[in-house]
Each structure stands twice: as C-alpha cells, then as structure tokens.
Image (cartoon, rainbow, N blue to C red):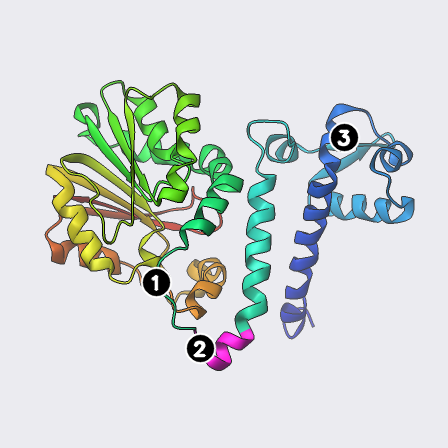
Amino acid sequence: MQNGINRYIKILLEQNKAEVLAIALNLKLFDYLEKDIMNLDLLVKELSTHSKNTNTLLEALFMIDLIYKKDGFYKNTEITKKYFISYLSTYCGNVFLHRKDMLNHGRKAMAELVSNGPEDVTMTKSPKKWASVSKKFLKQEQTTLISQSVVKIVKSLKEYPNMTKILDLGCASGVLGLEIVKSQPNIKAVLFDFPDVTSLIPSHIDEYNLANRVSILSGDMQNDDIGSNYDLIWCSNIFYFLDNKTDLIKKIYKALSPNGILISAHVEIGDEVKVYEDSLFYFLGLNLQGRTMFKPMELSTIFEDIGFRNINSYTTSSFPMTPTQIHIAKK
C-alpha cells in the first residue's frame, strides 16, 4: 500500500496541513502563545473557540512542527517565532495566506482550462491586481525572504564596487532595489513598475531614508521608456507575463551602459521529476492560462542571441516556493 496507490491518496493531506496553518494565523494563535504561558483552557478563553476542536488543532500544529507542549503548556517552535508572530518584522503569515488563496483560486479554474483552453487575454499582469498584491504581501516577502539573497548576488559581482546607477525593473514594493542601494553608498536606483504599483513606493523610500538616491519611473515596461545608462538591471519573475519577451530584453540591452549587467531571476521547468516537480505544480495555473513557462537555459539562449556575453547561469534555492534560475549577462 505504501508504495502503490497510497502515494496518491496522501496528496490530499497536504491541503489539510495548509488549512491548519491558515486557521492558526487567522486566529493569531501563535501571538497568544508568545505573549503568555498558555494551556488549553486559557487559550480557548482567549480565542473564544471550541475546546475539543481547539485541542485537535493544536495536535495538528504539533505534528507539523509549529508548536510543542511542555508541562501542559503550549509553546512556539523557533521557526514559528521567526516567521509567524504577526507583530514582528520577520512575519510571513500574509505571504503564506496570499499564496494559499492564489493557489486555491487557480485550482478552481483548472478543469475548465484543461477542457476549453485559456481565454484570449493580454499577456501582462493586471496593474490594479498587481498593486493590491504588492501592498498586501510582496513587501513582506521581499523584505524577509528575498532581499538578502538578492544583495548577496549583486555584491558577488566584481563590478559591484564601481556601480553608480541601477534599475529594479518590475519592482513591486521596491524593496529589492532599496536594499541594493542601501548596501553601497555610491549607488542610485530607479524603481520601475505600473503607476498603480509605484504609487505605493514613496512611503517605502521614506522608510529607508533614501529619497536622495532613489527615483521612481512608472509605465508599461513593454511600451514605455525604462531609462538608460544603467550599470545593473535587476528583473525577477516578469518575463512570464509578456506578449513579446524578446522585444523587452532588447530594450533592456539598450538601456544598459557599456559593460552593464542584467541579472534575471526566473523559474525554469525541465523534465526531471525530482528537480522540477515543485516548480511545475506551483506554476501549473499560470501554465494552463497560457503564460510563458521557460525550459532550462531558454532565457540564456535568448540573451546570447540578443548580444549579451559572458553569461553565468546557476540555480538557487534561496528564493521562496521553488528553485530559481539566475542568469548574469553582461553587455
């Protein structure tokens, strides 16, 4: 049974595990455990929940290593303390809840998409929806889960000490560009995204106290000017949504200064099950909607055809959800 059909039946359990964590986050259960010493009775009183079913919830959270019990009292594990306490700067509960809702929404449409195919939609992100997502959870995700990896990648470049002007293309919250600027006193940055998105960024710039070194450019990257003479252009997870990615990459190439560098961070999906399984299922909804899914090294080939040289490509697991392919391409 363990090596046969049970493998597929057990897939159903993962949705229950996700629901258990979502319930705990919405109840702010972990906050209560962090503030006070809580046994079951005290916790039920604070949460105004059903005693027996709350106990079942706690048992489930224990099974997935989010809490533990000692001397009759419940406590948060270290991973819970770091990422699921709502009042801490490292909180990622909204990231989890958003991605859960997004995947649930996608699942509801899958059968119809398989039967009827994708609707005839423009291959770009909806600016208003993207702005809403940026406001609700992308700043949290970029700050806590992505920015340190991005800065590490940029600082590893031998050209980094001499960089003076960068572009964060499709910047969302703008945090990635802001963190790069923060890392080096000579760097100035342009943050580019749809107007609905960039309207949220000034407050983030103020938080970093970088108004004198960071400017905002708003528009549609496919059709509008993105600026010029950049020493570095960072772009992540934008090419899936484009009508013509090659035209944008040509525009990026022209916008770079001589010897300028493009860093691309996108998910690529090959045929090896153990390597690409998570990536395929995470992007399954987008794929069924007709979005572009990249094969391994497909982007690297496009960069080379356009004129980039010395392309360094590697896979990193330091980004959330799935492995990400990094391409560092020099003009």
Measuring 25% from the left and 36% from the top, which residue is drawn there? 167
Q: CA distance from mark 2 to mark 1?
A: 15 Å
- 61 or 70, which lies in front? 61
> What's the residue type where badge 2 is placed?
Gly
Residue 161: give x, y in percent of width and height. Answer: 20, 23
Q: Which residues are magenta?
A: 111-118
- Report the predominant secondary structure element of the magenta stretch: helix
Q: Mark 3 vs mark 1: give the one in front.
A: 1
> What's the residue type where badge 3 is placed?
Tyr
> What's the residue type where badge 1 is placed?
Met
Asked where in the image residue 260 lies, by quadrant, the reply is top left
* Magenta-drawn stretch contains 124: no
Residue 267: give x, y in percent of width and height. Answer: 37, 54
Q: Which residue is mark 3?
A: 32
Q: Which quarter of the figure is the C terminus placed in?
A: top left
Q: Which mark is residue 123?
A: 1
Q: CA distance from mark 3 to mark 2?
A: 46 Å
Measuring 60% from the left and 31% from the top, which residue is drawn there? 82
For marks 2 and 1 on the same chain, the one whose residue lies earlier in the sequence: 2
Residue 96: give x, y in percent of width and height. Answer: 58, 46
- 266 or 253, which lies in front? 253
Q: Which residue is mark 2?
A: 117
For marks 3 and 1 on the same chain, the one whose residue lies earlier in the sequence: 3
